[in-house]
Amino acid sequence: MVKEIILMAKSWKGGGYCVAGIDTTTGDWIRIISDDAVRQHAVTEEDMKYEDETSPQILDRVSIECIAHTPNDYQPENYTMDNSFYWVKTGQADIGEIIDLHPTDFHGMLFYNNDNKVTPGEIQAINSCNRYSLALIRPLNTKINVRRWENPERPKITACFTYGGRSYQYITVKDPTFVVQYQAMADGVYSLNNVYFVVSLADPYSGDGKHWKLVAAVLEA
């Protein structure tokens, strides 16, 4: 099956990328995964190349050959790609087109609670038809935190913001372009206005089995 998406997230994950977008036909979220369980099904740079050897960029319209819809308990949007085919760029979108196709998501609490992570038990308590692992949100009162806790060369970049009237603290940012920009800045707290976040629920963390909430992409409004 072929899925055409507007690419909304291409964030770091386990030696590859977490790739997600909006289905141009249905307006639904689609997460593209590989069949490589060792990499937690991350998509590599080689997996996603166009035939001309260039890589897809955020807001590209991309046609992807998929093997099957492969949801799991916490990521119902998963489709496994067929890596024997090149990805095909079919156009380019802007944020206005995206909002027309898929208005911002509102689920009350972000990923079922007000914390920066969620337990498998909390997910299991949600009816399967109401589970989700991707959302497009318009954060308010957004602050970006830059902290060099352990490695002075690689500061931790997190976001604090308000969503649905609730405050969310220290959500890790995984947008490569955004992270590189802020890693060059001094430790501190920086205000951020007029953006959209693509937020994602990660695979269970090996240390505690919990699913961390992530900012997978930062998009200018």
Image: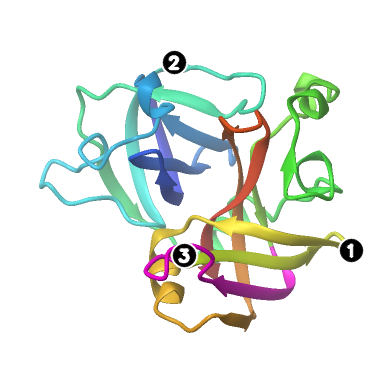
Q: Amino acid at mark 2?
A: Ala
Numbered disc 3: secondary structure:
loop
Q: Which residue is mark 3?
A: 94
Say which residue appears at 50% left-offset and 34% top-offset: 31
Say which residue appears at 81% left-offset and 45% top-offset: 107
Q: Which residue is mark 1?
A: 165
CB under 8 Å between discs 3 and 2: no
> Looking at the figure, which quarter contains the N terminus?
top left
Q: Nearer the viewer, residue 56 or 35?
A: 35
Q: Magenta stretch: residue 150 in it?
A: yes
As measured in the structure, the alpha-carbon distance from the residue carrying label 2 to the one carrying label 1 is: 38 Å
- Mark 3 crowd level (few <14, some 14–19, many ≥20, 10 Å Cα): few
What's drawn in magenta, residue-wise? 138-154
Q: Is residue 112 above or below residue 69?
A: below
Q: Nearer the viewer, residue 205 or 108?
A: 205
Say which residue appears at 37% left-offset and 28% top-offset: 39
Which tag, 3 or 2, sits closer to the chain's start?
2
Disc 1 or disc 3, which is closer to the eye?
1
Check residue 17 in the rendering and tell me which mark sits there, or answer none. Answer: none
Q: Amino acid at mark 3?
A: Asp
- Mark 2 crowd level (few <14, some 14–19, many ≥20, 10 Å Cα): few
Say which residue appears at 80% left-offset and 49% top-offset: 115
Q: Position of residue 74 (x, y in %)?
A: 66, 26
162 sits to left or right of 56: right
Q: Is residue 150 above or below residue 123?
A: below
Residue 163's quadrant in the figure? Answer: bottom right
Q: Which residue is mark 2?
A: 68
**What is the tally of numbered marks visible in this picture?**
3
Which tag, 2 or 1, sits closer to the chain's start?
2
Disc 3 or disc 2, which is closer to the eye?
2
Numbered disc 2: secondary structure:
strand
Q: Position of residue 13 (x, y in %)?
A: 42, 42
